[in-house]
Image (cartoon, rainbow, N blue to C red):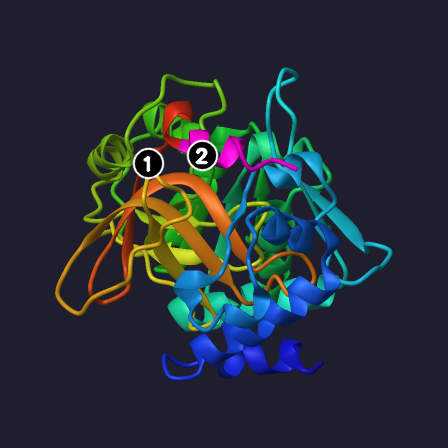
Amino acid sequence: MDLPERIFTATSGSFNSLALELFHYQYSNNAIYRQYCQTLKVVANAIDSIEKIPFLPINFFKTHPITTTEFMPAIIFESSGTTQTINSKHLIKDIGVYETIFTNCFNLFYGRPEEWCIIALLPSYLERNNSSLVLMADKLIQQSKHPQSGFYLQDTAALYKTIVSLENKQQKTLLIGVTFALLDFAEKYSLPLQYTTIMETGGMKGRRKEMTRQEVHNILCKNFQVQNIHSEYGMTELLSQAYSKGDGSFNCPPWMKILIRDEDDPLTVHTSTQNKTLSGAINVIDLANIYSCSFIATEDAGKLFPDDSFEVLGRLDNSDIRGCSLLAL
């Protein structure tokens, strides 16, 4: 199957046919996904539109090995969490496929990494050795080839000096950081940024009180005197990333698509329209998840706009995902 090469040729016209082809491939070669579909009494041959495809509840990545075909994983990405939680695990067949995906995503939205100095402020993630975000940041840092690109753990004083130096050189810089670490940095150091783009990746994980994305962005914009804060929408269970350049809406690469499902009936997917904004729970089709599952029902609430951009409103309450729990194998 040549899908790994073909997903990057996906267009609005070819996406649906590629997704349907991938559904049948995963139904045939992913035992957990097939069993889930059969539990729903889905007739595979009757699936003729992406809205009819069953979306696997994301919690299955916590309880089952989600693999399409049998293989020895090259790496297992694991989500962050507390000692009281069960972490998601994503078994990766080929690290090279992941590297190609996030590099193509970055090129699409930001240009070549070589044009940037890339600084990663990911302290909680660096303490783990199985984070997909750390691997992505590490490879992008290597690709940037800038001598001041790199990771910062807790030394915010050194980070401040580096950014001041880069600003003085008028060097285009990307500071990508987990939310709580960016807020900590902003509280200690307030400086106007002209050549630095700040990108938050989400994540409080009990380090701070929960805040809305807009509240976080307001603080960062004020302290760094910038107009916009960029964001990345990614997760352990997905190989692709969507990006927001500061207007609150995210855009997907051509091989990734957001659909909206009904919060009260998780099996009902709303059909997108040309002139209507849809609200509900977020489903993701990620064609890059060839060897796991490309059809994921997340636990995020959101809005889908007519131009296929989307907004993340926050996490669903347990009551809102009760339908998914009834479908556990």
Q: Secondary structure at mark 1?
A: loop
Is 266 contained in the magenta span?
Answer: no
Q: In the rendered image of this protein, does residue 245 appear above or below residue 8?
A: above
Q: Are marks 1 and 2 in contact (CB under 8 Å)?
A: yes
Q: Nearer the viewer, residue 116 or 65?
A: 65
- Tell me which amino acid carries mark 1: Asp
* Residue 224 placement, left or right of 65: left
- The residue carrying mark 2 is 323
Q: Pointer 1: what residue?
A: 264
Where residue 21 appears, as percent x and y from the top left, is 57, 76
Q: Nearer the viewer, residue 38 or 95?
A: 38
* Residue visible at 33% across and 34% down in the picture: 314
User: Which amino acid type corresponds to the residue marked 2 in the rendered image?
Assistant: Gly
Task: Please state the horizontal and vertical placement of residue 246, each as a whole percent of the image.
Answer: 25, 51
Residue drawn at x 59%, y 43% is 151
Q: Nearer the viewer, residue 222 or 280?
A: 280
Q: Quadrant of residue 65?
A: top right
Q: Quadrant of residue 142?
A: bottom right
- Residue found 81% across the figure and 54% down from its top: 73
Q: Residue at x 40, y 29 (%)?
A: 185
Q: Position of residue 221 (x, y in %)?
A: 23, 39
Q: Is residue 302 left or right of residue 292?
A: left
Q: Residues within 10 Å of mark 2 (few under 14, many from 20)?
A: some
Boundaries of the magenta span: 321-329
